[in-house]
Structure formats: structure tokens, C-alpha cells
Image (cartoon, rainbow, N blue to C red):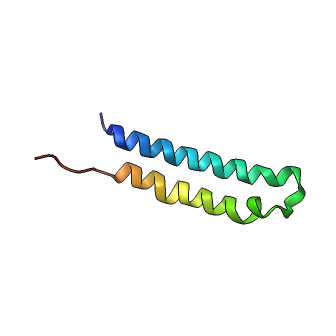
């Protein structure tokens, strides 16, 4: 397998963070775009998910066992 079990868990966490970002982004549709969660927090959460967590999960090697 090209990815280990730990990497799959980290990728799953990254996908969950991205989904959370899109849910926060969708909150602004019902209340007009005045909601600070959809304007300020959601883009930061999406960037963290896409640019930090998922690439880290793909590049993570773990500890080598002797």
C-alpha cells in the first residue's frame, strides 16, 4: 500500500476539516453575508485543510522501527 494507516487517518482528518470549512461557508447563505464565521473563519479553515493538513498527511512517513 502506498499510504500507511496513520496517513489514511490524517487524510481523513484533513477531509473532515475541509468539510467543516464548507459548512461554515454555507452558513452565510441563510443570514446574508454578515456572518463572521462564513466571511472570516471559513476561508482560514479551508486553507488549513487544503494547504497544511492534507499535504502533511501525504508526506508523513512516521517513525522507522529498527
Q: Quadrant of residue 46?
A: bottom right
Q: Is residue 43 above or below residue 58?
A: below
Q: Position of residue 66 (x, y in %)?
A: 10, 47
Residue 39 left/right relative to 64: right
**What residue sits 79% from the left and 51% below the top?**
27
Q: Quadrant of residue 55?
A: bottom left
Q: Is residue 10 above or below residue 31?
A: above
Q: Position of residue 31 (x, y in %)?
A: 89, 54
Residue 33 left/right relative to 23: right
Extreme residue in the top direction: 1
Extreme residue in the left direction: 66
**What residue sits 72% from the left and 52% below the top?**
24
Residue 23 left/right relative to 45: right
Q: Quadrant of the N terminus?
A: top left
> Disc count in the image?
0
**What residue sits 87% from the left and 49% below the top?**
30
Residue 59 left/right relative to 22: left
Q: Is residue 53 above or below residue 40?
A: above
**What residue sits 63% from the left and 45% below the top?**
19
Q: Position of residue 40 (x, y in %)?
A: 72, 66
Q: Is residue 20 above or below residue 41?
A: above
Amino acid at each position: 500500500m502506498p499510504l500507511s494507516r496513520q496517513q489514511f487517518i490524517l487524510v481523513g482528518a484533513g477531509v473532515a476539516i475541509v468539510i467543516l470549512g464548507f459548512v461554515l461557508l454555507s452558513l452565510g447563505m441563510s443570514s446574508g453575508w454578515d456572518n463572521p464565521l462564513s466571511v472570516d473563519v471559513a476561508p482560514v479553515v479551508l486553507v488549513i485543510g487544503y494547504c497544511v493538513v492534507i499535504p502533511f498527511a501525504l508526506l508523513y512517513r512516521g517513525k522507522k522501527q529498527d
